Amino acid sequence: MTTSVADPQATEVPPEQQKGLAARLWDRWPVKLAVAVIIIIWLIPTLGLLISSFRQPDAVKTDGWWTVLANPFDFGQWTFSNYDNVLSSQGFGNAFLNSLAVTIPATIIPITIAAFAAYAFSWMEFKGRQIMFVVVVGLLVVPLQMALIPLLRLYSSGASIFGVTVFPDLDLNGTYMAVWLAHAGFGLPLAVYLLRNYIGSLPSSIIESAKIDGATHFEIFTRLIVPLSVPALASFAIFQFLWVWNDLLVALVFLGGTPDVRVVTQALQELNGSRGQDWHLLTAGAFVTMVLPLTVFFALQRFFVRGLTAGSVKG
């Protein structure tokens, strides 16, 4: 008859589990305190904006938002009229649809192009690959504001080099296509950089096995790379969607400010009135514009950190 001796390492409890709740709360307390302070600093203005959006117009102009905290259950000081005015008579519904028409293609176009480019930079051999990648990443330093006038001229009169037309005269100013191309062009360098780091860190054995099985580059990309790259794709989708949705300058320059094509940021700018007298409407409109970006972020946030940190180290 034999007896077995239990492995002491097999039953060893990790140190993290041995700590009590109080000990875990006090562990690395300076970092946790700093995070809590940052959260409070961010939340206080947002809370004030939210409270002001439900207050009477006269109260917003005369008293600070914190005065309602003295008697928060006095329902006479609360109102939904600000939101009703914004949604019914300020043209926010049409502006919301225009923003969707601008933001969705301006997010999908650079993601699609950058995914193909990232795969090529990572797993395809061709001359000048590293130089081209450095040039693409170097475009990150080019500010968008410097390109507005050249893009306006390009959209209005086209471009030719030595008599050869490289961009046709399509008169794109005032169209959604102009905004899509502008946002896609300036979103591509960051997209290529993020996706190349992620796709390049995928195990080479997967790619080699697919090649041995006779898969083409397109089949490898569509059947292997895209499903495995969802975290990185979602991370850039959050960045690009928030950037385009909150943009005012590009939309104002290329679309103009007419009611039929204006986006939510332009509608929000006009809510305050010519003399700043409608600040109560501005607070309500701000929260209306925040609904969709918050929905997108919380829907994709589980991929966010994984997509950003992927490719930083190889295991």
Image: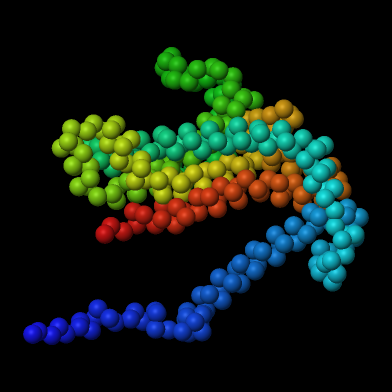
Nearest the viewer among 105 and 18 is 18
Q: Is residue 245 placed above or below 181 in the rendered structure?
A: below
Pick whichever, 166 or 73, lies toward us.
Answer: 73
Q: Where on the picture, by quarter, is residue 177?
A: top right
Residue 3 versus residue 260: which sits nearer the camera? 3
Percent coordinates x, y for residue 13 in the rendering: 33, 81
Look at the image and tell me whether residue 131 can be seen.
no
At x 49%, y 36%, the residue is: 108
The image position of residue 35, as x and y in percent, is: 56, 70
Q: Residue 39, relative to residue 52: is it above or below?
A: below
Q: Residue at the spot x=49%, y=82% of the render?
A: 21
Residue situated in front as seen by the camera: 212 or 147 = 212
Horizontally, residue 89 falls left or right of residue 232, namely: right
Residue at horizontal 41 percent and vertical 55 percent from the top: 306
Is 168 drawn above or below residue 195 in the view shown? above
Q: Indicate the quadrant containing the C terminus: top left, top right, bottom left or bottom right.
A: bottom left
Q: Is residue 174 visible?
A: yes
Q: Quadrant of the N terminus?
A: bottom left
Q: Residue at x 36, y 40 (%)?
A: 226
Tell how many labels: 0
